[in-house]
Image (spheres, grey):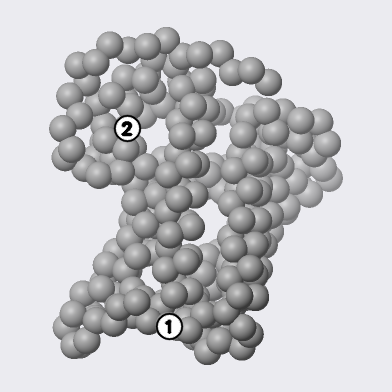
Amino acid sequence: MKRTLIFGYGVLGYAVFLVSLLYAVGFLANFIVPRSIDSTPTIGTGWALLADIGLLSAFALQHSIMARPAFKRAWTRIIPEPAERSTYVLLSSILLGTLCYFWQPIGGVIWNIEGATARGIVYGMFASGCLLVLAATFQINHFDLFGLRQAWFVLMDEPYKPIPFRKPFLYRQVRHPLYVGWLMAFWSAPTMTVAHMLFAVMTTCYILIAIQFEERDLVQQHGRNYLRYRQEVPMLVPFTGKTGTAPVQEPIEESA
């Protein structure tokens, strides 16, 4: 019974993730959803700024804190370890949906690209960024990243098999292709409003900070393999001259 519940919980978390992801795409593209990033403002600019900064900060803090190994060790004393990733995915998805639904648009246009062809190119970049995010998840293991693989092992009554360190195609170009895809999606706006700029700037800052914590954890997990990888492959911009000739430093032990 417990195995079935954990698997069902994993499926639920993945389903909520899919819904929130599709909503977020519509939110950024100003398409279908009831309130998009550039909808008509309904409250004053000051209150809108406070609300949007609060929503972005809540998402960023949850996303980062729950991803840290020390938090996971403490968290799995409360919930079953195989459900840890599904819980992270579920809460992240709920917060993402909350952010999109309660977002407060802000008037003002920073740039507006005119001409159907030019706007089509920018929308094409947005779509390419979204597709890059999806492709990057499948290159490392989409279902492990979103908790379904862990739940499946529990259902089959088999021990979890960690994903070994490897470098598929996208990850040989940059170390974080998933983040590159998100950055493309966030900044590819034919009409850049003040609200959209706030979103893009804050999420970009979050990504650049989050990478530092994520890579520290990866060094602890994979040791010299990741140190060497970090020296050979650029972080976000491909073809930036990484040579792999720098000496490999030993990982520093994490203090809990």
Using a 10 Å C-alpha cutoff, classify the residue at mark 1 as few (fewer than 14 neighbours), some (14 to 19) or many (20 or more). few
> Would you say residue 141 is visible in this rendering?
no
Q: Amino acid at mark 1?
A: Gly
Q: Quadrant of residue 196?
A: bottom left
Up-down: is 43 above or below 138?
below
Residue 108 place in picture, x, y as percent: 43, 83
Side of 4 relative to 250 (left or right): right
Give the farthest residue toward the front.
46
Residue to which mark 1 is pinned: 108
Residue depicted at 61% across the width and 88% down the height: 42
Side of 145 relative to 133 (left or right): right
Up-down: is 145 above or below 81?
below
Residue 22 place in picture, x, y as percent: 51, 70
Up-down: is 49 above or below 90?
below
Residue depicted at 49% across the width and 49% down the height: 206
Using a 10 Å C-alpha cutoff, classify the residue at mark 2 as few (fewer than 14 neighbours), some (14 to 19) or many (20 or more). few
Residue 253 place in picture, x, y as percent: 56, 13
Residue depicted at 37% across the width and 20% down the height: 227
> Residue 167: which numbered mark, if any?
2
Foreground residue among 89 and 161: 89
